[in-house]
Amino acid sequence: MKTKQAVFEALFAEQATANADLRTMRSASAIRKDLEKSLKALLGLITAMKDVADWKLLYADVNELVKAAKNSNLPEPKNNPPQ
């Protein structure tokens, strides 16, 4: 019984440490918000430079990707009937 208790306490301490490490990480929402801001800034730069000769091809490629992303729709999740 003492051995089982010691193993449990070791696992509990390990999990507590892992939980503490997770709490120090930034949330996924915050990371996503920063990523969205960075992507908007990059797209703004590419759009601003679209008339510069060396940037025309990049702008055309990125513009097509943005159009494709806007036109793609994920299917709506089907509501599961209550059981």
Image (spheres, helix red, strand yellow):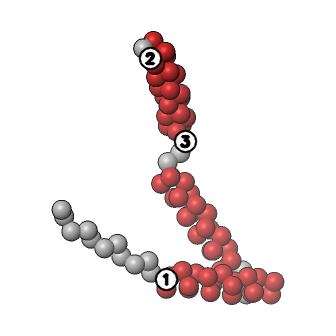
The percent coordinates of residue 14 (x first, y second) are: 53, 27
Binning the other alpha carbons within 10 Å of mark 3 as few (below 14), some (14 to 19) or many (20 upward) gives few
Binning the other alpha carbons within 10 Å of mark 1 as few (below 14), some (14 to 19) or many (20 upward) gives few
Residue shown at 54% from the left, 80% from the top? 69
The percent coordinates of residue 75 (x first, y second) are: 40, 78
> In the rendered view, does 46 fall on the left or right side of 79?
right
Residue identifier under label 2:
5
Residue shown at 67% from the left, 73% from the top? 45
Q: Quadrant of residue 74?
A: bottom left
Residue shown at 75% from the left, 87% from the top? 57
Give the CA distance from mark 3 to mark 1.
32 Å
Eye-nearest disc, 3 or 2:
2
Please state which amino acid type lies under the numbered disc 1.
Ser
> What label does residue 25 carry, if any?
3
Q: Could you tell which of marks 3 and 1 lies nearer the N-terminus?
A: 3
Is 7 located above or below residue 33 in the figure?
above
> In the rendered view, does 16 fall on the left or right side of 41?
left
Report if the CB atoms under discs 3 and 2 are less than 8 Å apart.
no
Residue shown at 50% from the left, 21% from the top? 7
In the rendered image, the quadrant that contains the N terminus is top left
The percent coordinates of residue 35 (x first, y second) are: 58, 61
Q: Is residue 51 visible?
A: yes
Q: Secondary structure at mark 1?
A: loop
Give the CA distance from mark 2 to mark 1.
54 Å
Give the CA distance from mark 3 to mark 2.
31 Å
63 vs 71, nearest the viewer? 71
Q: Secondary structure at mark 2?
A: helix
Q: Could you tell which of marks 3 and 2 lies nearer the N-terminus?
A: 2
Please state which amino acid type lies under the numbered disc 3.
Met
Residue identifier under label 1:
72
Report if the CB atoms under discs 2 and 1 are less than 8 Å apart.
no
Is 52 located above or below residue 6 in the figure?
below
